[in-house]
Image (tube, rainbow, N blue to C red):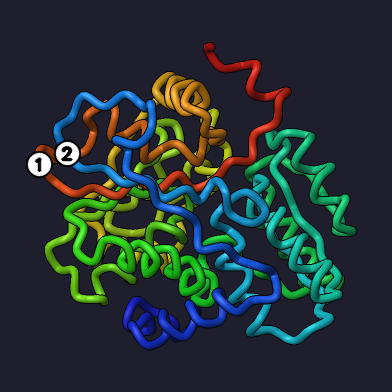
Amino acid sequence: MGEVSADSVTLDLLRDAWETVRSSPLGVINTPMIPWCQTTLPLHLRCNVHIKLENMQRTGSFKIRGVANQFFRRPEGGNFVTMSAGNYGKAFAYASKHYGSKGKVVMPETAPVSRSILIQSFGVEVEQVPTSCLMNVVNRCVQEDAMTFLHSYDDLDLIAGHASLGLEVLEVIPKPDVVVVCCGGGGLLAGVAAAIKLSGCDGTRIYGVEPDGACTMYRSFIEKKPVGMEAESIASGLAPPFAGTLPFELCQRYVEGIVLINDDEIKAAVSSLYRSGLVVEPSGCAAFAAIVNDKIPELEGKTVVCILSGGNIGKDELVNFPG
């Protein structure tokens, strides 16, 4: 990351990125935030939960926020390569088509075929490889084909774009007690946490949620450095090969803790949300799953924000979840 560190992330930088995201030609939406009590979702906790519906975002997930800021700050007509399990790749492909850029997405073999087909429909090339080979293929594209690597979670412009979600939350609830966010490589969690804490909400507790089979940030917190692992989870979007360096730094500074959920809890959360009329993918419902399974400490009587981060799940995938 060169000279970039957590100190590079200032409130001015994040507000500037928010303006870029809001005015982006990619059509990023200020997604609704609804009180949990106005849904049919079950909640046994006595707290005031608000749900940020980022599953309704353009391209179906929060990823378009970071992509909007990344592409704005790079030359038009570039030749970019990235790695993604699906959601970043979809937003990247959408932006590539709009900006007339050439693009390639290196995807893990485990990613659903439907994601690969969708990304290719935007005119972007896809290469599927074992997860352990993702960076090797990206590096080959950079060296042999002179492509520019756009990182899907460890990038300052991307994280600053994701921070727009945190700033939107504060427009509705200026001083939340607790904010719960999914965590894969850590880009969204880092951006949201930095936005909220740098805005003066020192008392707000922010928690990241990871699958126990893909807990790179959780392990990074323990080892006090970014680590990788052979990640395996139904939430493929939360299973990167390693935690991001800049996200790790920011999460260490601004996040209270990382909590873990298992795949059964994720499956039940997808089904529960679907029964209430909300289509949310496994990766997108991690924060919800953590709240309903009592993984977040001391929520009684608190104002809580839960981020539903993505809704990219096909009918073919939904049949695998309990009714």
From the viewer's perspective, is 117 left or right of 64? Answer: right
From the viewer's perspective, is 156 left or right of 134? Answer: left
Residue under the image location 20 percent in, 42 percent down: 48
Q: Is residue 232 visible?
A: no
Q: Earlier in the sequence, mark 2 or mark 1?
A: 2
Marks 2 & 1, CB-CB < 8 Å contact: yes
User: In the image, residue 305 lies at what x, y percent?
Assistant: 30, 49
Of helix, strand and loop, which one carries label 1?
loop
From the viewer's perspective, is 138 left or right of 205? Answer: right
The kind of residue on which mark 2 rests is Cys
Q: Nearer the viewer, residue 317 or 22?
A: 22
User: Residue 245's image quarter?
Assistant: bottom left
In the rendered image, the vertical position of residue 135 relative to residue 16, given as above or below: above
Q: Nearer the viewer, residue 108 or 24?
A: 24
Residue holding disc 1: 301
In the rendered image, the vertical position of residue 283 relative to residue 44, given as above or below: below
Residue holding disc 2: 47
Of helix, strand and loop, which one carries label 2?
loop
User: In the image, residue 133 lies at what x, y percent?
Assistant: 69, 48
Distance of label 2 from label 1 (alpha carbons)? 5 Å
Which residue reaches farthest top? 323
Which residue reaches farthest front? 38
Q: Nearer the viewer, residue 3 or 269?
A: 269
Q: Is residue 284 visible?
A: yes
Mark 2 burial class by Cα count in 10 Å: few <14, some 14-19, many 20+: some
Residue under the image location 36 percent in, 31 percent down: 289
